[in-house]
Amino acid sequence: MIIVMEHNATQEQLNRVLKYIEDRGMKSYIHKGDLLNVVAVIGNEINLNPENIAALEGVTAVKKVQEPYKLVSRVSHPEDTVINFPNGVKIGGLERPVLMVGPCSVEKDFDGLLQVAKAAKEMGCQFLRGGAFKPRTSPYDFQGLEEKGLQYLAQARQETGLLVVTEVMDTMDIPLLCQYADVLQVGARNMQNFKLLKALGRINKPVMIKRGPAATIKEFLLAAEYVVSNGNPNVILCERGVKGFDSQFSRNVLDIAAVPIIKKLSHLPVIVDPSHATGKRYLIEPMGKASLIAGAHGLMFEVHHDPDNAMCDGAQSLNIEQFKETTRVFNKLIGRIDYDNKNK
Ligand code: PEP
Ligand code: MN
């Protein structure tokens, strides 16, 4: 249930509404908008009589929220969430789309990572991505450098000023990751690891959740609801393709329609990862362009200094030259001609 307060409602009137909800055993979240304050009620609403609430002073409307994802829904929070980073970077709303690039996993060769990071900085990207804890299908594949990888990312951040996005696989690693990362990524395979999502609700760093390969949009939004309802409002959603029946040419099926659908249903920022969606480097540019045109708040894709010898996902990684070419196209599309040397 959503309770909309009058624009000139007093704090006292708001407190009375909150107490009314609390007395009936429910939790409330206040969203302070530019014009109106909205109270979202979470819990079993059986004890709440909407007519009685509507009659409380200062209340202008009471709406039932049909969707199970209440806090991430646009109904409870009409304005877009814009996530602010300490260095001034913003994601969401009408902000210019952001670019997150880097290798699938952080590897032993720090110099390779730094080459990618420097190129990313030069092209105006805001984030360096790279896994230090890797979810691999086979236990015999490279599992990541763990803390050493985090140190490499932090070192690259220090040299370039890029923000760091890296994956968290286990609640146990959260304190360590919080020391190094600017955004904690929940991988597609962990989208419904509810214990992990709840724990990420209790940290004060933004969390990026990747869509599970077989997850519906509703399940995707409910994963975000886990984080937000546990106290962390800064969640980014990442569409990365879902399982189809034909993986011969594209690893997954990129659900581009998910972008405008999520923007309609939710206020959270949504970005697209064309690397994991397709598994093919030549598809990064066309699918990235399509995603930006569909309204994505950013793109994340893989870049490696030597993709042919990458420890993982080389086939869906651009080399540095290809990255620059592709990013010129993206920069042009998002109106950043200052980075578009070729098309000036
Ligand atoms: C990744 O971003 O490196 C990754 C493992 O992606 P996903 O969880 O989408 O498979
Ligand atoms: Mn990868």
Image: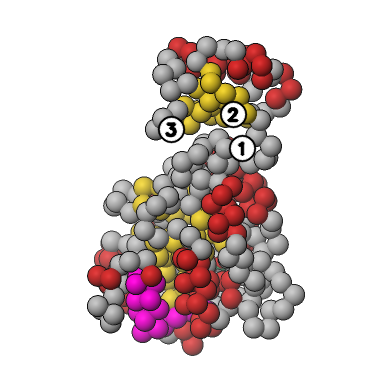
User: In x, y percent, where is residue 37?
Assistant: 47, 27
Residue density around tag 3, few if under 14, some if 14–19, many if 20 or more, within 10 Å? few
Dominant secondary structure, magenta: helix
Place residue 343 in its image quadrant: bottom left
Residue on which disc 1 sits: 70
Residue at 28% over, 71% down: 337
Residue on which disc 2 sits: 2
Magenta span of residues: 316-332
User: Can you tell me whether the CB of the residue at mark 2 lies under 8 Å from the nearest atom of ligand 1?
Assistant: no
Badge 3 marks a residue whose secondary structure is: loop
Q: Nearer the viewer, residue 144 or 32?
A: 32
Badge 2 marks a residue whose secondary structure is: strand
Q: Is residue 235 above or below residue 331?
A: above
- Alpha carbon separation for disc pair 2 and 1: 9 Å
User: In x, y percent, where is residue 51?
Assistant: 66, 16
Q: Is residue 324 magenta?
A: yes
Q: How many marks?
A: 3
Mark 2 or mark 1: name the one nearer the start of the chain.
Answer: 2
Residue density around tag 2, few if under 14, some if 14–19, many if 20 or more, within 10 Å? many
Quadrant housing the N terminus: top right
Residue density around tag 1, few if under 14, some if 14–19, many if 20 or more, within 10 Å? many
Please name which of the two marks, 1 or 3, marks the residue nearer to the observer: 3
Mark 3 or mark 2: name the one nearer the start of the chain.
Answer: 2
- The amino acid type of the residue labelled 3 equals Gly
User: In x, y percent, where is residue 138?
Assistant: 66, 73
